[in-house]
Amino acid sequence: MAQQNTPLKKLQARIFRGQNGDADGDDKATKTGDGASAAGLTINIPNPVLTGTTQNGPDPPKMPTEQTPPKQSHPDVDTRPFRQRIAEKLGENYHGTERFRLDQDNKKERHWKRWGPYLSDRQWATVREDYSANGDAWSHFPHEHARSRVYRWGEDGIAGISDNHQRVCFSLSLWNGEDRILKERLFGVTGHQGNHGEDVKELYYYLDSTPTHSYMKFLYKYPQKAFPYEELVRENVNRDRDVSEFEILDTDAFDDDRYWDVFMEYAKDEQDPESIYVRITSYNRGPEPATLHVIPQFWFPNTWSWSEDHPPKPSMWASGDGVITAQHSTLGKYHLYCLPSPPPVNSQGELLVGDSGEPEAVEADLLFTENNTNYNRLYGGNNETPYVKDAFHDHIIPSHRPKGDEDGHPGFFHTKIRSSYARQQNGRNDETPSSEEEQGPRTPFPAGPSYVNPAKRGTKSAAHYVFHDVPPRGGCAVVRLKLTPRTPRTDPSIEDEGIFDETVEERRKEADEFYAGLVMGPISDDLKQIMRQALAGMLWTKQFYQFIQKDWLKGDPAQPPPPPERKYIRNRDWKHLYIADILSMPDKWEYPFFAAWDTAFHCIPLAVVDPTFAKKQLDLLTREWYMKPDGQIPAYEWNFGDVNPPVHAWATFRVFKIERKLYGREDVQFLERVFQKLLLNFTWWVNRKDQGGNNVFEGGFLGLDNIGVFNRSEPLPTGGTLRQADGTAWMAFYSLNMLSIALELAKHNEVYEDIASKFFEHFIFISDAMTFRGGSGDDDEFSLWNEEDGMYYDAIQFDNGHSMQLPVSSLVGLIPLYATLVLEPATVNRFPGFKKRLEWFMDNRPEMSERNMANMKARGRGERRLLALASKERLVKILEKMLDEDEFFSEHGIRSLSKRHKDHPWGMDVNGERYEVNYWPGDSKSGMFGGNSNWRGPIWLAVNFLLIESLQRFYQFYGDDVQVECPTGSGDYMNLVQVAEEIQHRIIHIFGRDVEGKRAANGGNPKLDHDPHFRDYVWFYEYFHADDGRGLGASHQTGWSGLVAYHILQSGATCRLPRTPKTPRSLAHHYFDDTMDPQSEYGDETQSLYSAYSAADLNTLGDISPDAL
């Protein structure tokens, strides 16, 4: 193809959106505004060639049932942007177009969330798909099987969407002409193959999303060379735990920038949530022309192969040129319009022309098959249908087709599955189930001439676009599709690509408007972009999660029964589980399943953008089809019976208050409904985790995995019982949150006043058990506090009544700070029954109320009362260690283990075996918990978040009366809210650019930091290296790391650049001046210390008043 050099200025002006003199003037790729739409978030889209521009231009696709009506002008139609029309209609009640859609969805006027990013990033090798005898999910359903074998419990894909019951799915697939398979799902190493456990080995970013998914943007970076599947596995298998993981950027896959930037955008019609625009924009970043196959796929999950009665089968067919129609018994009929694409353009916006000298459209070749397993390929069995799941691979890629021997017998391939023997050979003696290599014949079919159905019918379809010789260094190709139940008679955008692009751009601007509404104060463009990507990523990582324990354990009638020993491996006791919901995932590749305590943290930033969705998550986990009848909340699918920290009550009340603060709504019914179920869960904790009835709790690893010297989920090798400082502190924290909720509910129902009194008593008894000083001679009492070290420790209680502390300085000793509650005098006076019980305890149980470390008789600022495990003296001692940069205080937050243990590890010998805790600032060097447990140093945003809030609450009580050195030894004294802000800023610095343009999370990778096609994009890792801040663990969108968005919204306006000096306190002190006049709901003061922002900003997260916290 040649480049078109004729002067077509009007056409050229339309080629790149953002450079076409748009009427709004705000679409330039380099322009940013209050909408936090930074340079890296705007992409330039070539417009299609308009029909009739050239003699050989493409005709519009023929439609299935109706004649296309002639286009007519409608002078009375209001052509203003939708947001302007809605703003005019709503007047002063207008809070943004996306807020308008959220209100419509909440009122059930329109189902804006029916379609969303509900596909998993990985369904293969999950527990739900594991039907093995040994529970080795990684080996039972490996990546090599995923293209040929149907899933039972979910679907996956790249940037995929589905309806909210996952009845039909859509996702992206690609082929670069070199790979042995289509790129239709994300690849990574398994738990057996990775030197630090499972890890995705792809480059992709969740760039943008609104809460209703009216607009979404995703970026996938696809190598032009053959994807290095085997190299990634081989190199990671050969590395031990002392070495960093081998990533795709360590290969030559992206050398010379030979890759594609593939942007996937979704947009919904302005008032029709069922109609979805899809725009796929692919840029050749390499130095030479390259060919790309873009193959969006549209399919039904297999629901017909499991039961003997063969339920009705949905169907798809080609109903016209470039049109796929899908019919489902409950979803109805949808059409996927696969529009002709313009030819590629070069980086100057010049169209490529064909041999005729004119631009030639790229038409889609529609492909159809059945979403059925290829038993021939995998097992040598007989296929149910002649066309199977992996048909598109065989159809498009010649090398993927079967290769028979001279006698016509099919060939064989080996599925490489990592065995425990091989791991032992590499010095990694993991206790992982061994697996043998599977083998089966290559596909000995089809009997006919085609791998795909020539009748163009089936249950799985694709639109195959081929873009030849896309120009280098920014050459671009665009695919446009529309999924809708409508036809061109009622939807002109199907035929008018100009309307199509304008609609997508309008949805993007509405997303800008939505995120602009969250930001108050002078936050930098870089921080706005980080905030937006963090929130958008959390919205992208929703997933349809299905698990019906009865069916999963028993097996399906139409399939061979599972091995009998399988039912004893995991989750046997969770017979009541019946889950089929849209849930927030920790990470849709590494953790494509819900995790209870992760969910609680997800809901905090989610509540900022969509409190209804956040409330739904918290409510679901306490419903009877999730929660056990005895009150236990399911942990995660690998072991629903594991014990996670009890943070559900905290998250419930925080979400309630965030919605009240930002949206002006009090959902008391939600609060009461969840509270009632949490009463069961609290009782379960008291009955199951306080074995001795002493209010000192164990609980297993409590989410902190390998933080202790012993495996805290197993019997101690020393004998005795482990009394966990963090387990007991978590329960004190739980008690205070239940007390807070009860007082809130008591405003509406006085019965809850008595319940508040009960949780007050629970807190007192737990506090007493935690803080008793010992030395009374009573063997039944012992201390978890070490006065000499100024730290709380775990302790072993032996059967003879003696105890021994385990002096490991870790988060275990900081978590007691979480249990902090400030009681406003107006609150106490409002509830006389509660006040009476409070005073009775102080008068009649002085041995407890005075021994309680935060003396309840002492009054703080404004006559407030403080309920806390740590007294003023102990608080200062703990903070002295926590803020010591040689112990806990990193440049990037609070470490999970003191750095002191680097030179001074602590351990003990038991029965000839050494147990020891060392400081590991990065990935774990231990095989404990499968080698993927990392709490001996790294920074975790979730636990840091609770520490920050605790300091803010302590400040509410102490004000400026408590000031500490920050950092310890610096001579710079701060009050506690300043300390909290400093921790927030250090966490923000993990992600923000420093003066040299580097992001700590990128680990010093120059391509990620400085390449213009990488530097604006951010990954939100699972945890972070304690000394240099580089991202570790799950790499793309770990839900609770999205908490950084909350930090940016609360304190980003004062955040300095990373690696720059702090503003002297004398200059920054005005930030904390008593300039606000927000009367507390509970208090009578006319001035408040508790917000960093002006009174005009009280609807923002900057408010840290007692009511807000």
Image: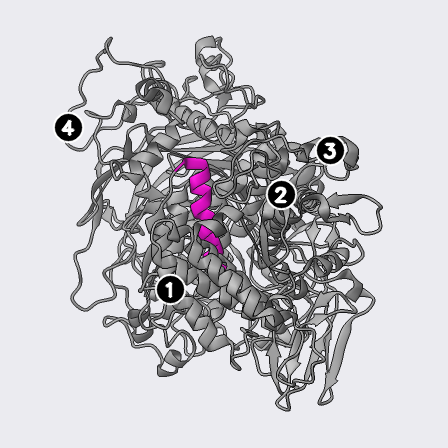
Other residues around mark 1 within 10 Å, as few (<14) / some (14–19) / many (≥20)? many
Mark 3 element type: helix
Mark 3 vs mark 4: in front: 3
Which of disc 2 and disc 1 is earlier in sequence? 2
What amino acid does circle 1 point to?
A: Arg
Which of disc 3 and disc 1 is earlier in sequence? 1
Mark 2 element type: loop
Which of disc 4 and disc 3 is earlier in sequence? 4
Disc 2 marks which residue? 254
Q: CA distance from mark 1 to mark 2?
A: 32 Å
Mark 1 vs mark 2: in front: 2
Magenta highlight range: 647-664
Which of disc 4 and disc 2 is earlier in sequence? 4
Q: Position of residue 24 (x, y in %)?
A: 46, 14
The image quadrant that residue 124 belongs to is bottom left
In the image, 811 versus 359, the foreground residue is 811
Whether residue 89 is in magenta: the answer is no
Disc 4 marks which residue? 66
Disc 1 marks which residue? 377
Whether residue 660 is in magenta: the answer is yes
Mark 1 element type: helix
Q: Position of residue 305 (x, y in %)?
A: 25, 63
The majority secondary structure of the magenta stretch comes to helix
What amino acid does circle 4 point to?
A: Glu
736 shown above or below 951:
below
Which of disc 1 and disc 4 is earlier in sequence? 4
What amino acid does circle 2 point to?
A: Phe
Mark 4 vs mark 1: in front: 4
Q: Are marks 4 and 1 in contact (CB under 8 Å)?
A: no
Disc 3 marks which residue? 1068
Residue displayed at 73% across by 75% down? 916
